[in-house]
């Protein structure tokens, strides 16, 4: 990583935690207890809405107005309760711009999950998904949890990528898929919850708990863009 683009921590936590389960809860620096911690990375072209998705999930707000591109990498923490277990997600917001690509490459290998975004109003961002998948294949862990998100579905009048095209691409690559809107909140909590459930089930199975199937969960829970709340 170049000196120029050091990690920015929006929360006071350090950015170097790995998955933990000590049999007793840990305390995050924001004062919340958690049992497990995972790193989730947001990737995709510049402007697809990675920062807005994270802000929607973390703060329940939408960053309207002028678009300020992420520089390098940033992160936020959020603790979720998944099946009675406190799961801390440390969510890394990467810069989509090409010139920061070498910075983000360095972070892939530590990610437990990746949310790969395109913008349904921007065909190029969809066409670039294949290149992002190649990059993920090259730099991320082999067993990384991956999900494809088509964002900005609130902009129905500007949509150029059909839902079926997203579904088809996701099926081709065997990844779960959903459409989201950082603006309306549609499916935003669901995307992060699904990831947290998958990571939790992979690392810790409670007695008598059935096997968790991420694809089935997403298919069952996902909501269409006719509606505007998560
Ligand atoms: N209509 C609509 N606009 C959105 C949505 N999400 C993001 N935007 C807008 O899209 C622009 C880019 O959003 P960002 O979240 O900054 O995009 P990014 O992917 O983080 O971009 P980089 O930091 O350059 O990689 C902003 O003007 C947002 O207001 C959405 O769900 N719906």
Image (cartoon, rainbow, N blue to C red):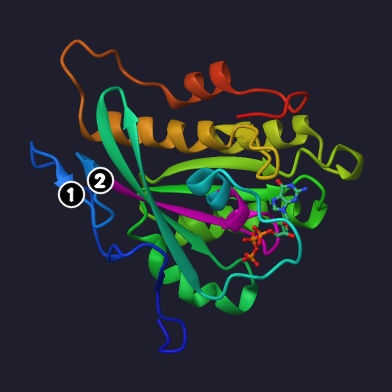
Q: Are marks 2 and 1 in contact (CB under 8 Å)?
A: yes
Mark 2 vs 1, N-terminal side: 1
Q: Looking at the picture, how far across and down is residue 94, in whole percent? A: 52, 64
Q: Is residue 83 above or below residue 6?
A: above
Gap between marks 2 and 1 measured at Cα: 6 Å
The image quadrant where one finds the N terminus is bottom left
**Badge 1 local density, few (<14 within 10 Å), some, or many (20+)?**
few
Q: Secondary structure at mark 2?
A: loop
The image quadrant where one finds the C terminus is top right
**Badge 2 local density, few (<14 within 10 Å), some, or many (20+)?**
few
Q: Quadrant of residue 12?
A: bottom left
Q: Residue at x 33, y 36 (%)?
A: 199
Dot label at residue 32: 2
Dot label at residue 27: 1
Task: State the extent of the magenta-drawn residues as a range.
Answer: 37-53
Q: Is residue 27 above or below residue 47?
A: above
Q: Looking at the picture, how far across and down is residue 133, in whole percent? A: 56, 53
Q: Is residue 103 left or right of residue 165?
A: left
Q: Residue at x 83, y 42 (%)?
A: 155
Q: Is residue 61 left or right of residue 168?
A: left
Q: Is residue 184 magenta?
A: no
In the image, farthest residue toward the bottom = 3
Q: Is residue 150 left or right of residue 71?
A: right
Q: Secondary structure at mark 1?
A: strand
């Amino acid at each position: 990583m170049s000196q120029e683009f050091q990690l920015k921590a929006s929360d006071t936590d350090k950015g170097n935690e790995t998955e933990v389960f000590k049999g007793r809860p840990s305390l995050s620096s924001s004062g919340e207890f958690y049992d497990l911690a995972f790193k989730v990375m947001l990737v995709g072209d510049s402007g697809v809405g990675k920062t807005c998705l994270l802000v929607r999930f973390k703060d329940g707000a939408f960053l309207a107005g002028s678009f300020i591109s992420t520089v390098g990498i940033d992160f936020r923490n959020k603790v979720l309760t998944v099946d009675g277990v406190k799961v801390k997600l440390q969510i890394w917001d990467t810069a989509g711009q090409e010139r920061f690509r070498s910075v983000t490459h360095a972070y892939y290998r530590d990610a437990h999950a990746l949310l790969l975004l395109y913008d349904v109003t921007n065909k190029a961002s969809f066409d670039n998904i294949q290149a992002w998948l190649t990059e993920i294949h090259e730099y991320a862990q082999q067993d990384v949890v991956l999900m494809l998100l088509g964002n900005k579905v609130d902009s129905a009048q500007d949509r150029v990528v059909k839902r079926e095209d997203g579904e088809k691409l996701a099926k081709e690559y065997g990844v779960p898929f959903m459409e989201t809107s950082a603006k309306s909140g549609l499916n935003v909590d669901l995307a992060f919850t699904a990831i947290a459930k998958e990571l939790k089930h992979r690392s810790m199975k409670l007695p008598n708990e059935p096997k968790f199937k991420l694809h089935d969960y997403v298919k069952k829970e996902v909501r269409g863009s006719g509606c505007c709340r998560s």
